[in-house]
Amino acid sequence: AGGGGAASEGPKALDELVVGFAQVGAESGWRTANTKDIQAAFEEAGIELKFSDAQQKQENQIKAIRSYIQQGVDYIAFSPVVETGWDAVLNEAKAAGIPVVLTDRAVDSKDTSLYVSFLGSDFIEEGKKAGLWVLDQYKDSTEKVNIVQLEGTTGAAPAIDRAEGFADVIRQNPNLEVIESQTGDFTRAGGKQVMEAMLKSNPDIDLVYAHNDDMGLGAIEAIEAAGLKPGEDIKIVTVDAVKDGMQALADGKINFIVECSPLLGNQLVDIIKTLNEGGTVEPRIITEETTFDQEQAIEALPDRQY
Ligand code: GZL
């Protein structure tokens, strides 16, 4: 059947709906938890989900979206690996009458008619929460605090915004200085490689701010290989709160984690159901999330779903 939501032919039975989902990749624990949750939610709702993994390449995501348009799916959802370069393919989906939902990451398109809703976190807020912990940690220190930053994928909304939110807050204390900032592409291997290089070029790093747990876990390996104690000689603050990160926090190798929830599946299904019934959805739906220190991680670990 041709594409398009309820506008064209009224609500479909859920088992007739087809949704195409173009995922970023499988670069981190967060991403795999996000994929599992979305697939489970559609399974439970009895809605067919076509799924593609772009291995973190924008051209693969664009190819996947184009194939969903060809197949005439009813809805397209995706998590744009970077913010720019989406207008052409989103205009193709619009021309085909297929509504698009953004999950997790945002696009910089000025034309907000190109997607129905953005469902995900406020990454600037996440960066601010990390910054506030650092501000508090060093509020009485009189010396310079050397901070290195492990950035997420270059051009990705979480990388841009987590850096912005963090910088906005730590500028309140001139002793806090980001002496080096590099991308580790949200992967454990990337975090380890960058941290090894940073340790070589900066003798006295006090704190690492990693845009996700996986890069923080890579940094731990590099710090230990250099004979230093992560969480003590060099403090570590990360974002996500996936199981491996929470375990490192419980073990005192990470000092603070800002949660970023990957559990978007049920909210995405609800958006699709509402659209199918001809309803309207909020243009921006922000997920609930918190922060964890060591004892909160110890307490939360047993019930952690991912
Ligand atoms: C954030 C998400 C980020 C995670 C990383 O919503 O886009 O991508 O923080 C993941 O772990 O790779």
Image (tube, grey):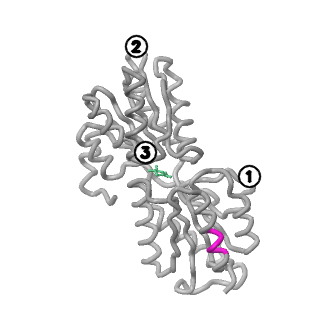
* In this picture, residue 266 sits left or right of residue 109: left
Horizontal side of 306 relative to 58 (left or right) equals left
| Residue located at (37% from left, 33% from top) | 196
The residue under the point 47% across, 66% down is 265
Give residue 110's mark: 1
Mark 1 or mark 2: which comes first in sequence? 1
- Secondary element under disc 3, as helix, strand or loop, is loop
Which amino acid type corresponds to the residue marked 1 in the rendered image?
Lys
Q: Secondary structure at mark 1?
A: loop
- Which x, y percent locates residue 132? 45, 32
Q: As displayed, is residue 272 above or below residue 135?
A: below
Magenta segment boundaries in residue numbering: 65-69
Q: N-terminal of the two: label 2 or label 3?
A: 2
59 in magenta: no
Q: Residue at x 43, y 34 (%)?
A: 209
CA distance for labels 2 and 3 = 27 Å
Q: Main secondary structure of the magenta part?
A: helix
- Reading the image, the residue beneath label 2 is 143
Query: Disc number at residue 294?
Result: none
Please give the count of numbered marks on the rendered protein: 3
Q: Amino acid at mark 2?
A: Glu
* 189 on left or right of 233: right
Q: Mark 3 sits on what residue?
A: 212
Q: Residues within 10 Å of mark 1 (few under 14, many from 20)?
A: few
User: For the residues marked 1 and 3, what is the alpha-carbon distance in whole angstroms?
Assistant: 28 Å
Q: Nearer the viewer, residue 108 or 66?
A: 66
Mark 1 vs mark 3: give the one in front: 3
Measured in 3D between alpha carbons, the distance from the residue under mark 1 to the one under mark 2, in whole angstroms, is 44 Å
Which one is in front, 150 or 38?
A: 150
